[in-house]
Image (spheres, rainbow, N blue to C red):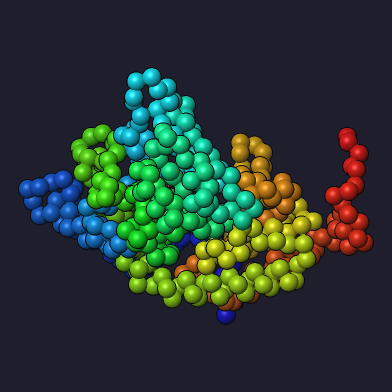
Amino acid sequence: MALKLPIYMDHAATTPCDPRVVEAMLPYFTEKFGNSGSRNHRFGWEAEEGIDWARERVARLLGANEKEVIFTSGATESNNLAIKGAAEMYEKKPAGQTGRGHIITCIIEHKAVLDPVKRLVKEGFDATFLEPGPDGIVTAKMVEAAMREDTILVSIMWANNEIGTINEVREIGALCRKRGVIFHSDGTQWAGKMPVNVEQDNVDLLSMSSHKIYGPKGVGALYVRRRNPRVRLVAQQDGGGQERGFRSGTHNVTGIVGMGKAAEIALQEMDAEGARLLQLRQKMETSLTKAIDVSQINGHLEKRLPHLTNISFGFVEGEGLMMAIKDIACSSGSACTSASLEPSYVLKGLGVGDELAHSSLRLSLGRWTTEEQVDFAIENITRAVLKLREMSPLYDMHKEGIDLSKIEWAHH
Ligand SMILES: *Cc1c(COP(=O)(O)O)cnc(C)c1O
C-alpha cells in the first residue's frame, strides 16, 4: 500500500485524538450538554458525573487522589497556576528582607515555565536558571548547589520536549521535601507516556496536557498535593470557584471527558507502546547515524524518552534540509522569532553551535507510527542530507582532512 504523505513525526508538538477518545466525548456535546454547576437538574448532574469519571482516570494515571487533580485549559495554564500560585502563597515576608523568595528552574525548560518565572523576577522574586551540561540532564546535585536559605520553589521538567532527556525528578523531589521547598514539575512530555506515582516520585505539583497524550486540545490538569505537605496556591483566575477555587470557569466538560479517556488508554497501553516506539526510534537513530557521517544525537543517549530523537547533521543548511524533507512533518532546530530564524534555545543551552542547531531535526513517533513510515523517513532524510552535502565546499574540505576549526575566515 502506498504511504500517505506527509507522514507525521511531530508527536511532541501534538498528537491526533484517539478515536476512542472522540467517541467518549460525543454525548457531552449534545445529550449531556449540561453545566456541571447546575445542581438542580439532571443535565447538571450528568455533566458532573462525566467530570468525576474523568478525574478518577487522570488521578489513577498519576497515582494521586481524585481531590488532587485540578482541570485547566492545558499545560501552559497548569504551569502558570503552579508557579505563580505557589510563589505568591509561599513568598517570604520577614522584616528587613528585600527579595520575595528564590526560585530554581533551568534554562532549557519550556517557555510556559521560563516566562512565568521571569515575570515573578520582575515582581521581586529571585531566580536561578540552572545550566545543564551537553547531556541536558538536570541532577539533584545541581539543584542542591543552587538552594538558598530563601528558596521557596523548584520547577524542573520531567522530560524535555525538544531532546527527550529525563531529569532526576524523584531525587530532586526528595531533596525539596527535606528542605521544605515546594517542587513543581512540568510533566507534559512524560505523564501518559511513562509511569508516574506522585508519592514515590516526590512531586508536589505536576502539570500535564491532554493533547500530548491523544486527547483533545485546550484541556490539561495540575496535580496539587493534599498531604505531606498540603500545598496551597493563590488562584490566578477568580470567579465561580470551580475546581476547589483553584480555577474558576465553567468546566470544559467535553474536553475533560476526552482527557479522562485519553488517560485511561494511556495507562493501559503505555508499556507496550513505549517498547514498540523505542525499537522504531533505535532503528531510525542507528540507520541515520550510520548512513550519515558527522551527525550527532543531542542529549543523553540513555536517559531519554522512547519515542523522541533530536539529531544534528553537519555540513547541511537547515532551511535547505527542511525543504528537502517536506514529506516528513517534524520540527527543526530553528524557532521562528518575529521575522528571523533563531537557533533553538534548548540546543544552544546544551552548547550545540548555531549552525548545527539549525540543521537539527526533532523526530517524535506516536501511536500510529508504522515501521514503513520509519523506513521512509530514514531513506528520505539520508538522501536529502547526502544530496545537500554534494553542494557543500566545507564538507569537501572536511573530507580532505582539513581541520575547519583552525581556519581563519576572512571577515566581511
Ligand atoms: C506542549 C508543552 C507545553 C504546553 O502545553 P499546552 O497544553 O499546549 O499549553 C508545556 N510544557 C511542555 C514540556 C510541553 O511539551
Residue drawn 35% across and 68% down? Answer: 267
Relative to 309, residue 113 above or below = above
Specify the quadrant of the image occupied by residue 191.
Answer: bottom left
Res 363 → quadrant: bottom right
Visible residue check, residue 279: yes
Residue sitting at 65 percent across and 69 percent down?
A: 285
In the displayed structure, would residue 315 be above or below residue 18? above
**Residue at x 39%, y 72% (from the top left corner):** 269
Residue 150: quarter of image:
top left
Where is the C terminus found, in terms of image quarters?
top right
Residue 125, percent from left and from top:
44, 29
Image coordinates of residue 99 in percent, x first then y, are: 43, 26
* Extreme-top residue of the structure: 96
Is 86 in front, or is 34? 86
Q: Position of residue 140 (x, y in %)?
A: 49, 51
* Residue sitting nearer the eye, 241 or 368: 241
Q: Is 253 drawn above or below residue 387 in the view shown?
A: above
| Residue 254, image x, y percentages | 28, 55
- State the quadrant of the N terminus: bottom right
Q: Nearest the camera: 356 or 323? A: 356
